[in-house]
Image (spheres, helix red, strand yellow):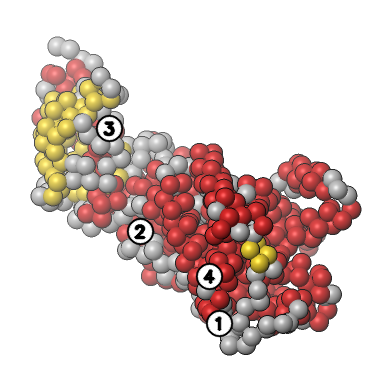
Amino acid sequence: MGFKNTILRPKSFVYAVIFILLLFMPAVLPVYHLMLFESGLTFAIMCLGFNLLLRYTGLLSFGHGALFATGAYAVGMMGKYFPDLYRIEILIPVALLASLIVSAIFGFICVRHTRVFFSILALALSMVLFALLVKLYDITGGSDGLHIDLPIMFGKSYEGMKRFEFLSGAYYYVLLCMFTILTIIMLGIVNSPFGKALQSIRDNEVRAEMIGIRVRRYRLYAFILSGLFCGVGGALWSFVNGHVTPEIAEWVFSGEIVYMTLLGGFMVFEGPIIGAIIFTYLKLYAFSITQYWMFIIGATLVALVLLLPEGISGGFVRLFVKLRRGKATGAA
Amino acid sequence: MLNVKNLIKDFGKVRIINPTDFEVKEGEIFSLVGPNGAGKTTLVNLISGHILPTSGKIEFFGHDITFAPAYRRIKMGVARNFQVTNLFEDSTVLDNVRICLFSTYGKIKKGLLPANHYKTITQEAVDILDMFGIVDRKDMLPSSLSEGDKKILDTSMAFALKSKFLLLDEPTSGVATGDKFKVMDTIISAVKKKKMACMIIEHDMDIVSDYTDRVLVLSEGKIIADGNPKDIMEQDNVKEILFGVTN
């Protein structure tokens, strides 16, 4: 399949249209909603990474919040200790490096186990990071967290600018570009021989070992890649939020990552993206309607598991298949 | 080529493989027979690195591989199939073979271009499936294959690893009786074409004597006979163990 054919496929065409529509978002959406949408996009990047482990490697992590926090805190700490280097071109690689180190350590320990043991180990390690972020007050700002200033982007300083102006201007396009590039990279990874190797490990660990795949090592690679996506997501999110607190390293947020992915449907590549964006809105609306917003989130999860076990995207796929089949029999 | 010396495997206090010695020459096709529980599959597991022995030595082309990890043995050229089919159930038949080829050619580290981009490897996977006669099912999931076809797929995956020594654990179990010889014909001609050495575990003595010139008889973890099938089957102890006949 050549590059030309890839471009001409209907799916690619739909993606291109969506991308062009997204370019006009700042003109259409009110600033407040745009900010929500932007944080949805950063979560989407994170969930893509999370799903590389869940869908393609068969590992459910309850500690990915810590990797997201690593990226966000990398930005915060750079602002605190190296204000001269507070440029987005430097901050993103630093966030990548930080999440590389943390996910390599986490991964090294976690991939020794699978299933629930893996999940609990990831959860435990993320709580260690959470505790460090809270307790090391002098370094991390403790439970108050760190303020995130507007970064210098490509030589242009945004000092004195209001955050919402920054977010509805150039930053939106930077974020959109990052999101697009990372989605394409992830799409490449899951369809590549490397992605196939991960899927074979998920399907049958014993056989994977016996066709020459170093199972643990490949799980570690997947964990690190997943961590890098979370790290970038966290770094990009920190600018949208303007403040980082240890809560994002806590298990509650890690649980929300799982929730987002399930909501969108983890069996479909695009599922986590849809889930992350819808979750951002769902949480906010539930929040504004009632103080028992967690009840709404919980009820949605129950409804989801019972009615749409494959998530929103999975439901769409099923509907599409049904309609198509209906059409085929109708024509015949 | 392969040299097994004094190999012992204990599970707890039970000795499954008693001190065992045998040699395999390059390109040699031979069979391993023995009653249930004799340790045939354990021997395959030990040579392929699925489990590690208690003591003894396994040499492959002069290299000591007794405790080498499985991936290194595969790289050196030891491949196996599984008696109870062991497939990637959520991948298509084609992908099951293709991932083996990606592994063989060291492409599993490539993470950006889609698998379909590697056209020669994809074509080779199709050719292997064609050779084993299941190419028309290449886009199906293994779960929708018959037991016999699953077995053939399992064998073709082991074959795709392009080994120098192929261990086949009952490649015809589950295959319809009428197809057994056809499957064996395919396997043997493929193996001969690639000049692989091959050890076949088999229960059917007709297959053993038709396809192999050498047979090892394993009983209670010991090799009790090694030689030409016709001569071996005349031996009293072999008769007793394999057919339950006592003179």
* Distance between mark 3 and mark 2 Cα atoms: 25 Å
Residue A69 vertical position relative to residue A23 in the rendered view, above or below = above
Residue designated by label 2: B103
Find residue A150 and report its horizontal and vertical position in percent.
66, 76
Q: Secondary structure at mark 1?
A: helix
- Tags 3 and 1 on a common chain: no
Quick one: which residue is furthest to the top in this view?
B247
Is residue B158 visible to us here?
yes
What is the chain letter for disc 1?
A
Mark 3, other Cα within 10 Å: few <14 / some 14–19 / many ≥20: some
Which residue corresponds to the image point at 56% horizontal and 79% vertical from the top-left? Answer: A87
Chain bearing mark 3: B
**Camera-side residue: A267 or B44?**
A267
For disc 4, the neighbor class at 10 Å (few under 14, some 14 to 19, many from 20) is few
Q: Position of residue A80 (x, y in %)?
A: 57, 69
Q: Is residue A132 left or right of residue A239?
A: left
Residue hosting label 3: B42
- Closer to the N terminus: mark 3 or mark 2? 3
Quarter of image, res B7: top left
Numbered circles on residues, count: 4
Question: Given this view, does label 1 or label 4 mark the residue nearer the observer?
Answer: 4
Question: What's the residue type where badge 3 is placed?
Answer: Thr
Q: Horizontally, is B67 left or right of B91 in the view?
A: left
Residue type marked 4 = Tyr
Residue neighbourhood size for the residue with mark 2, other residues' Cα within 10 Å, grouped as few (<14), some (14–19), many (≥20): many
Marks 1/2 same chain: no
Which residue is depicted at the point 51% across and 42% down?
A121
Label of residue A4 in the image: 1
Q: Earlier in the sequence, mark 1 or mark 4?
A: 1
